[in-house]
Image (spheres, helix red, strand yellow):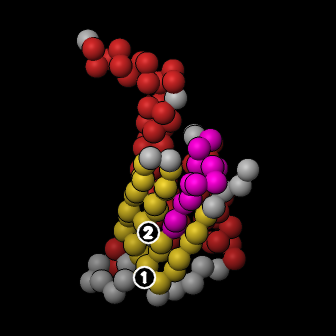
Amino acid sequence: MYMNIQHFEKGFHYNDKELLTVARKVGKLATYCSKVKDEGSYIRVDAENRRTDKKRDAIKVSITVKLPKKVLRAESRKPDVVEGLDRCIEKLTGQVKKYKELHQQKGRMQMLRKHKK
């Protein structure tokens, strides 16, 4: 299986080191849920350099994870691409874990029990 990772830059370009970092960090999401590697799934990383008064908000990174029956999304504004990427991955980790829990047979049964109480 392979992961479909799409990356788009607006207003700047990744250097080779940053591109490898993006792939490595985004690839960690697959460790939490195997459905990230499905053929119908993809991960889209958008990074944009924006002109702002605050330099700490200069780079906007957004990650969209398309999974079967669900779209997960995270966005972050940071001064550096790698920092923004890290923050987005932090946000998405919980969402991916919850998705996995809800879409596994064992997880669904546990969730049903919680809601019945």
User: Which part of the image, by quadrant, shows the C terminus?
Assistant: top left
**Is residue 87 something that shows in the picture?**
no
Q: Residue at x 61, y 64 (%)?
A: 5
SS state under label 2: strand
Measuring from the top left, give residue 57's x and y in whole percent: 34, 74
- 62 or 82, nearer to the observer: 62
Q: Residue at x 43, y 79 (%)?
A: 48
Q: Is residue 94 left or right of residue 13?
A: left
Q: Does the magenta portion include 82?
A: no
Q: Does the magenta portion include 37?
A: yes
Q: Residue at x 63, y 72 (%)?
A: 18
User: Label 1 to label 2, Cα distance in Å?
Assistant: 9 Å
Direction top: furthest residue: 117
Q: Residue at x 32, y 17 (%)?
A: 114
Residue identifier under label 1 = 49
Q: Which residues are magenta?
A: 34-45
Three-letter code for the amino acid on which mark 1 is drawn: Asn
Which label belongs to residue 11? none
When the figure is inspected, residue 111 is found, relative to residue 68, above or below; the finding is above
Measuring from the top left, give residue 41's x and y in whole percent: 56, 54
Quadrant of the rendered image containing residue 62: bottom left
Quadrant of the rendered image containing residue 58: bottom left
Residue identifier under label 2 = 61
Three-letter code for the amino acid on which mark 2 is drawn: Val
